[in-house]
Image (cartoon, rainbow, N blue to C red):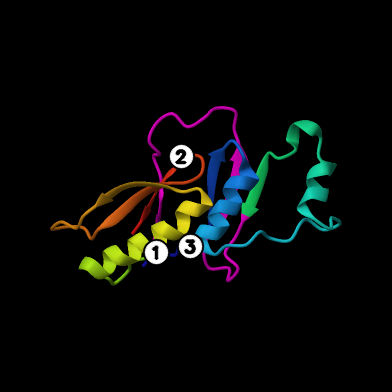
């Protein structure tokens, strides 16, 4: 048995508008924006305290229960040009199969589209995998409803 301690980790997204993308993912995952740093009443107050080139350069959301990873969204100058090398699978159909699973995926898709998500393709179950629905967030990053 390994004596290696399990590490906490953060998921970091490169994006154009960190706060907008973070707030989208808060809605998708039920995450929250943490309180602003000590000495600041709001995140806007904190943001205004930064040098102009650093304003709006990052934003955070987190699992209110503390179980899921913290998510950090950082502004980068370049846009997304190729398929993600990493994506999130949002687990909405766990334990469901067939029509019941498809209904859960479609219901979650319908909830996310008004938030700015874009429906991609439905991958139907095969011998190895259950059905999932490929989508994009508000900046075009792929994720799956699984």
Asked if residue 98 lies in the magenta stretch, the reply is no
Q: Residues within 10 Å of mark 3 (few under 14, many from 20)?
A: few
Residue 21 falls left or right of residue 46 = left
Gap in Å between the C-alphas at discs 1 and 3?
10 Å
**Image location of residue 29, percent across then percent down:** 51, 61
Q: Which dot, 1 or 3, sits closer to the camera?
A: 3
The numbered mark at residue 6 is 3
- Image x and y of residue 121, in percent: 29, 46
Q: Residues within 10 Å of mark 2 (few under 14, many from 20)?
A: some
Question: Is disc 3 placed on a helix, strand or loop?
Answer: loop
User: How far is the residue under mark 2 from the one under mark 3?
Assistant: 32 Å
Residue 7 in sight here: no
Residue 142 coordinates in the image, percent (x, y): 40, 44
**Res 75 seen here:** yes
Whether the residues at callouts 2 and 3 have beta carbons within 8 Å, the answer is no
In the image, which disc is placed on residue 140?
Answer: 2
Quadrant where the N terminus is found in the figure = bottom left
Residue positioned 45% across, 42% down in the render: 141
What element does badge 2 sit on?
Answer: loop
Q: Secondary structure at mark 1?
A: loop
Q: CA distance from mark 2 to mark 1?
A: 39 Å
Q: Nearer the viewer, residue 58 or 118?
A: 118
**Quadrant containing the C terminus in the rendered view:** bottom left
Q: Is residue 2 left or right of residue 138?
A: left
The numbered mark at residue 103 is none
As drawn, the label of residue 2 is: 1
Q: Which residues are magenta?
A: 61-90
Please identify the dominant SS of the magenta region: loop
Residue most toward the left? 127
């Amino acid at each position: 048995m390994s004596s290696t301690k399990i590490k906490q980790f953060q998921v970091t997204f490169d994006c154009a508008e960190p706060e907008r993308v973070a707030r989208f993912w808060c809605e998708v995952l039920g995450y929250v924006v943490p309180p602003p740093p000590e000495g600041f009443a709001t995140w806007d107050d904190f943001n205004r305290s930064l040098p102009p080139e650093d304003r709006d350069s990052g934003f955070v959301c987190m699992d209110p229960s503390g179980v899921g990873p913290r998510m950090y969204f950082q502004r980068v100058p370049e846009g997304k040009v190729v398929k993600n090398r990493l994506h999130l699978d949002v687990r909405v159909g766990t334990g469901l199969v067939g029509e019941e699973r498809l209904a859960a995926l479609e219901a979650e898709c319908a909830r996310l589209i008004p938030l700015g998500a874009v429906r991609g393709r439905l991958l139907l179950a095969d011998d190895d995998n259950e059905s999932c629905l490929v989508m994009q967030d508000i900046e075009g990053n792929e994720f799956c409803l699984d």
